Image (spheres, rainbow, N blue to C red):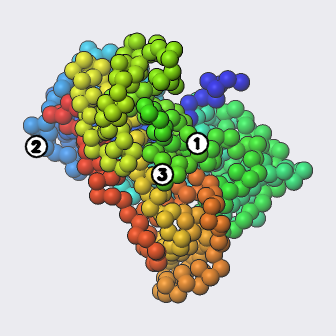
Amino acid sequence: MTFADLGTDLHDVTFTVVDLETTGANSAQGDITEIGAVKSRGGEIIGEFQTLVRPTRSVISPFVERLTGITNSMVATAPELASVIPMFLEFAHGSILVAHNAGFDVGFLKEACARLDYPWPGYEVVDTVRLARLCVTRQEVRNHKLGTLATFFNVPTPPTHRALDDARATHHILQSMFELFGAVGVTTFEDLQGLKQQGWKVRQSKKHLAHDVPHAPGVYMFVDGADRVLYVGSSRDMRSRVTSYFNAAESRGRMAEMVTAAQSIRVIVCPTELEARVREVRLIDELQPPYNRLSKGASRETWLKLTNEKYPRLSIVRTPPSQQDLALGPFRKNASARAAKDLLERIYPLKRCTAKPERADFRPCPAGEMGKCGGPCSGITRSEDYVRGIAPVVALLEGTPQAFVGHTMTHLKQLAVQERYEEAATARDVAISVLRAGSRGEQNGSVEKNEHLAAAMVTDHGFDVAIIRRGLLGATEHVPWGTNLQDVSRSLGLTAAQYPHNYRGLAEERSLISTWLFSDGVTLLDLETPISQPTNGYQRALSDSALGAPKILRRTDHRV
């Protein structure tokens, strides 16, 4: 089997979720009145598109006005479809189109392109209705309409029959379904497209294995007849999650094979979802279950590190850097770190090769002769001049990314002037991943400084209280409303796990903990060193710059 056979990880696929509002259901006669779209990669939104559209062949009926809130007066001054379609096609370029009942939305878009003499780009299309019918049964929902699924998946932005709101809701539903499919091994785009009701009878025959699994947070393990753990997963509701293994489809039969081999399901009930997720990470690392993806776990995380040489260069490392190292990360995938390294080496005159300029037989490397390797290979012989040229890279790795953002924007504009729009869009996404990796590093570092930290997250029925030791989980407890949280944290701290001072644990666990601590609804109860992110750091750059802030593209915005 080759790496190509494994398919494209869903985390690496760019999706554009689109929703249209129209004057009617017939694309040959009706008009588009609004387009809303959400572009994402790895579950993170990287752009939004929204505009009203002035209809030219029909008017908005009173029924549609009541349904959507869009009136004829609202669209009277809106741009016509002829100016909107090229902007949308540019926005969605290079991505997978997603829609709820995709035949409707894609049908209108195809008809619009044909009418305006634009070639249809031939997008691959994902229909969330089809996916929902595979992973959410009629015993769980009465139908698979957008509003029903939004309620089922607790979508924070419910659909309103306005295009952008509905696209945001569909995006949330899509990501929620990815979690369900991921639990049964569907982790690539090829898996997703090949889903069908294969192996249904096999899964149904094993459904009794879930009967004793409780509706509680925890870790579940599928175990074979030799008492070997085949697969480890976690959920805030183990019963619902485990049941999904017998309802969802798996095109390769991989999970059907696992379910067939399983003879029992072993569970570890946890007081909180956070503890369940941490235990899952630890057990996968310890047991290496054959049906868990080998890429899952701490080994996936990488860092970009500046080497300690006369002419420093960037190196991709898997070992967490020390506080003395100049490094950026963690990146969740090695491919993301490689893309970031490539972008920085294109923007700045960084030395790429390992040639030693102090050697008597030194010669510029082939890349240097083509102007693609900085330092001595491109004629910069004084190390002081070289270090001065890469000062923005040093600043970026030290946590001050403003110069990098400015230079990246200049690079994007140059690509746009040359009409290299696809390269510009890719470079922008890579720059965002650089800032996100830096932000994760800021969070992790801030948390790991605390020998003892107590925090509580509000839940539907009370609070999840956690004790954190230098970025690793010490203990958790769920308590009802009205409980004195300070008393709980003090007593929990007495029995929480202690770790040797030089023990770093798993990188994925530390990332889980820091992400949880910086989540909405978390209150800090006790800590030694304040956890925060610098005012001029990566997260601020993401929020403030045109690079990182998800932006609604309108007809006057031609930004790539």
- Residue 446 marker: none
158 to the left or right of 270: left
Residue 547: x and y in percent read 29, 40
- Label 1 Cα neighbours within 10 Å, binned few <14 / some 14-19 / many ≥20: some
- Residue 73 marker: 2
Q: Using the rendered view, name the quadrant where residue 190 is placed.
A: top right
Residue 76: x and y in percent read 10, 38
Q: Is residue 215 visible?
A: no
Q: Earlier in the sequence, mark 3 or mark 2?
A: 2
Q: Which residue is mark 3?
A: 324
Q: In the rendered structure, which amino acid carries the disc numbered 1?
A: Arg
Distance CA(mark 3)–CA(mark 2): 62 Å
* 54, 331: nearer the viewer: 331
Distance CA(mark 2)–CA(mark 1): 58 Å
Q: Nearer the viewer, mark 3 or mark 2?
A: 3
Question: Measured along the vertical axis of the image, is residue 323 above or below residue 86?
Answer: below
- Label 3 Cα neighbours within 10 Å, binned few <14 / some 14-19 / many ≥20: few
